[in-house]
Amino acid sequence: MKKLLLIGGLAVRDMLSEKVMALCLIIALAATAAPLLVIAGLRVGLVEGLRTALLEDPRVREISNASNRQFDSVWLESLARQPDIAFVAPRTRTLAASVLLMPQGRPQDARRVELIPSSVGDPLLSPVDMSAEFDKIVLSAPAAASLHAHVGDVLDMHLSRLGEGAAQESVPLRVFAVSPPRAIGQNAAFVSVRLAQAVEIFREKAVSWQDAWTSAALAFRTQAGFRLYMKHIEDVPAEDARLRAAGVDVTSRAGDVADLLTLDKRITLLFRLTACMGVAGFVSSLAAGLWANVERKRLSLATMRFIGVPYLTVFPLLQAQILAFCGSGVALCGAWIVGSVINHQFAQILPTGHPLCIINGRLCMVSLLLTATGALLASLAAAHRAGRIDPWEGISTP
C-alpha cells in the first residue's frame, strides 16, 4: 500500500509540475464530453418527459372493447390474473349505462350521465378508491361541475323502462368523491359493479328495482364489455395485438405508445452513434497525451526504476483517471449550465415539471463510470510502454 501511495504521489506531483499541459488535456476532454452529456440530457428529457406525461394519463394504458358482445366472466377473471395487467372491470351495455341524475331540491340541475362500473384500485380514480357501499358514487369532474354537486350531496338516480312492463324508479345516491380531472372528460359517474348491473337488469327485464338489485348479487356468467389497464405502457401494443388476434375488437392508444417506443429507439441509436464517435475521440486524445508524456519522461522513468521505484505501469493509469475525472467534472458543470439555459428558453412551451434537458444523478454516475472505463483503456498502451522501460536507459540515455 505504501508503494502505491508513493507512486500515486509522484503521479500527482508530475501533473502539478506541468499544470499547463494537464489543463490543456482536461479542457480537451471536457470539450469532448460536454456535448455528449447535453445530448444525453436532451434524450432523457424528451423521451422521459413524454413517457411521464403518458404515465400520468391512465387512459393511455387502457384497452376496452369497441362494441358490445358477450364476454365470459371466467375469461375476464383470467385477464385480471395476468402479471402485466393492473386492473380489469366489466362494462354494462351502452344503452343501459345512461341515467338521469338530479340533485335533491334542484330539478333544474339534472344531467344525464354514463354509469361506469368500478372497484377498488381503479387507475382512473387513483388516489381515490371506489366505495364498496351500493349507495355511494364517484362523480367525474365535468359531471360534478354541471350538476353543481359536492362531496356528501345526495343525488336521485331516475330510471325508466319503456314498452311492456314500463316502470320508473328513483334511487338516492350519495356523492362519495369527485374523480381527478384527468380521469374522464365527460359527464360520468363511477359506481359499484353490482349497481351498474342492477340498472341494466331493471331496464331489460320487467322486474322491480329490489328484484333487480337482488339479481345483480348473483354471479354474471357473461359481461357486455370490459376495460383493462396495463401496468406499463410498453405492454399496451402487445396486449392490443393479442386481443385482436383472439377476435376481440378493441380500442386503445397502442399507436401512440408504439410511436413513443419507436422514437425512444431511434433517439437512443442516434445518441449511441454520437457517443461512440465522442468516446473514440476522447480515448484517442487521452491515449496520445499519455503516450507522449511517457516518451518525454522516459529518462526520468528509467531513473526511477533504476533506484527501485516500483509499479511504474501504474503511473500513467493514475494520471489518466485524474485527468478523466477532472475533465468529467468540468464537462458536467458545462453541460448543467447549457441544460439550464435550454430549459429556461423552453420553459414557456413545456408542461410544468417536465424540463427538456435533464442532467440527473443517474446520468452523472453513468458518465463517470464510462469516463473511468475510457481512461483505463486509453492508458493501457502508455502503461505498457512505461513497463517496458529498462533501468539502464536512465544511464545510457544522455
Image: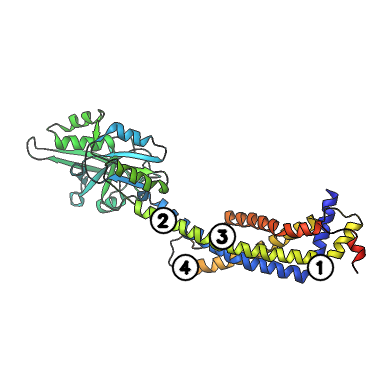
Residue occupied by mark 2: 260
> Which percent across, then down, holds residue 184?
31, 51
**Residue occupying the point 73% across, 57% down:** 380
* Earlier residue among tags 3 and 1: 1
Residue in front for this viewpoint, 327 or 50: 327
Quadrant position of residue 80 = top left
Residue placed under numbered mark 3 in the picture: 359
| Label 1 Cα neighbours within 10 Å, binned few <14 / some 14-19 / many ≥20 | few
Q: Secondary structure at mark 3?
A: loop
Marks 2 and 1 in Cβ contact (< 8 Å): no
Q: Amino acid at mark 2?
A: Leu
Q: Residue 188: percent from the left, percent from the top?
A: 26, 47
Q: Which mark is residue 377?
A: none
Where disc 2 sits, the SS reads: helix
Q: Secondary structure at mark 1?
A: helix
Residue linked to disc 1: 296
Give the distance between the C-alpha atoms of the residues marked 3 and 1, in whole angstroms.
39 Å
Towards the viewer: 288 or 262: 288
Horizontal side of 132 relative to 282 (left or right) equals: left
Q: Would residue 33 be found to the left or right of residue 50 on screen?
A: right
Q: Which residue is mark 4?
A: 346
Specify the farthest residue to the left: 164
